[in-house]
Image (cartoon, grey):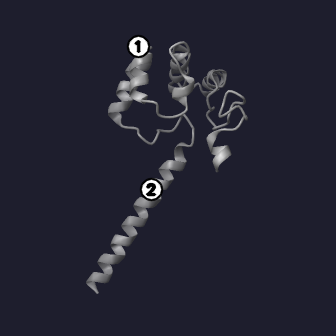
Amino acid sequence: MRTKKLLLISALTIASLGFLAINNVYAYRGDYTQKGLDYTPEKHEVMEEAFENNDYNAWEELMAGKGRVTEVINEDNFARFSEAHRLAEEGNYEETDKIRQELGLRTRNGDSIGAKYGKGDGQGYEQRNH
């Protein structure tokens, strides 16, 4: 009887952890108001410093080629991207979305932006592959 209880508790724990992991994956889905999958408080602090100092090199190193944003944001448009980040932190999502659209990035609701997004077909990764 005790073994059955332990097995049941173990199975429920594993199922719960699996659900949480899947839920976190679907929570982000390109919404810049959500924390990304590799978020840590330490990384966030370094990221904030990069934005505050308009330090593209620090941001690029921290991102290490992760995500489409690293294909779009470069040294020339990083100041504009930093501005979008600041506006988002202030809760000014309308202006943030305008800048992100200008840069060819997803807006708050995850909309793709058109030819600059994806492979020129106007569809983002999630729309093409899910």
Point out residue 36 in the picture as x, y percentages from the top left corner. 47, 39
Most extreme residue toward the left is 2
Earlier in the chain: of badge 2 and badge 1, it is 2
The amino acid on which the numbered mark 2 sits, given as a three-letter code, is: Leu
Q: Please give the residue where the numbered disc 1 appears in the rendered image.
A: 53
The amino acid on which the numbered mark 1 sits, given as a three-letter code, is: Asn
Point out residue 44 in the picture as x, y percentages from the top left corner. 38, 30
Query: In this rendering, is residue 19 above or below 128?
Result: below
| Residue 97 or residue 115, whichever sits in front | 115
The answer for how far apart the CA atoms under marks 2 and 1 are is 35 Å
Identify the secondary structure beneath mark 1.
loop
Point out residue 74 in the picture as x, y percentages from the top left corner. 52, 18
Q: Please give the residue where the numbered disc 2 appears in the rendered image.
A: 20
Picture residue at 65% right of the left edge, 38% below the top: 124
**How many neighbours does mark 2 have within 10 angstroms: few (below 14), some (14-19), or many (20 or more)?**
few
Quarter of the figure with the N terminus: bottom left
- CB contact under 8 Å: marks 2 and 1: no
